[in-house]
Image (spheres, rainbow, N blue to C red):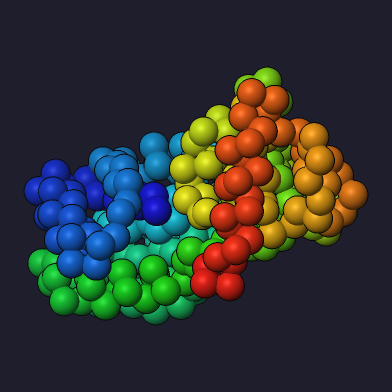
Amino acid sequence: MRIAVCEDNAIHRDIMEHLLNRYASERSFSFELVPYEYGMNFLYDMEEGSYFDAAFLDIYMEDTMGNEIAHKLRAMGYQGEIVFLTASPDFAIESYDVDAGGYLLKPLDYEKLKMVMDRITRNITPSTYQIRQRATVTKVVYHEILYIESSNSKCILHTESGGAYTIYKTLNTIEKELGDRRFLRCHQSFLVNMDHIKQIEKQFLLSNGDYVPIRQRGVKPVRQAYIDYTSSKSAIL
């Protein structure tokens, strides 16, 4: 999970990082935090393709207002969580205007932050893969994924419904992000969802009729991995 903290006060940024690290420790939760001193720098990054699952926005920043940033994010199609940081509850109504996850009063209280984070993390489903494209995110349910193939500097994710998504990441990175046993690295350039395998020969035949190659120097361990998976499939599902 990626979290942006837009706060022009360095001390408050450090406090947020400390509280989020405490939350991560208590909840066995992992995240990447990116701090911003200026709200416009955060907005520029979003416009250039960065994505964050949650954004904590200080209402009063040196270069802009947090509520203005929030409105621009929603206008861009941003679907992530927005939480306001403020010294006054006067802007509480603004949180409803941009469908925000709430607001936190300064000085920050850990118990209130924990409540907000619990609400945010409940909305992130672990059985979906998030494909980020500029300010929008597409969530693909694991079961819908047929296979992922590496093509030059990008990967193509193929779905059961016939969709294909371009992802500008390495196959190694995607495999780690999925972190699910159903996805088998059967070839240097292919990651296959074993739930969709219908037949094994020199290649895997999938439920939609596509073939996925098996690396020739590792046919036996790849086949054995599939056999082991299917034998314990009921326990996994």
196 sits to left or right of 53: right
Residue 22: x and y, percent?
15, 61
The C terminus - image quarter: bottom right
As rendered, which of 51 and 38 lies closer to the eye? 51
Q: Would you say 136 lies left or right of 104 here? A: right
Q: Residue 145's spot in the image, x, y percent?
A: 70, 54
- Vertically, is 82 above or below 171? below
Q: Is residue 134 visible?
A: no
Tell me where residue 26 sits by quadrant. bottom left
Question: Which residue is painted at 39% across and 50% down in the image?
Answer: 2
Q: Is residue 144 above or below residue 102?
A: above
Q: Is residue 167 left or right of residue 174?
A: right
Of residues 118 and 164, the one nearer the viewer is 164
- From the viewer's side, name the closer residue of 102 and 189: 189
Relative to residue 96, is residue 218 drawn left or right? right
Q: Residue at x 39, y 68 (%)?
A: 121
Quarter of the view holding residue 116: bottom left
Residue shown at 18% from the left, 60% from the top:
25
Instruction: Please state which of residues 3 and 47 is positioned toward the viewer in this rendering.
Output: 3
User: Is residue 25 shown to the viewer in this render?
Assistant: yes
**Residue 156 percent across, percent down from the top left:** 71, 37
All told, the count of numbered labels is 0
Q: Position of residue 52 (x, y in %)?
A: 44, 50
At x 23%, y 73%, the residue is 114
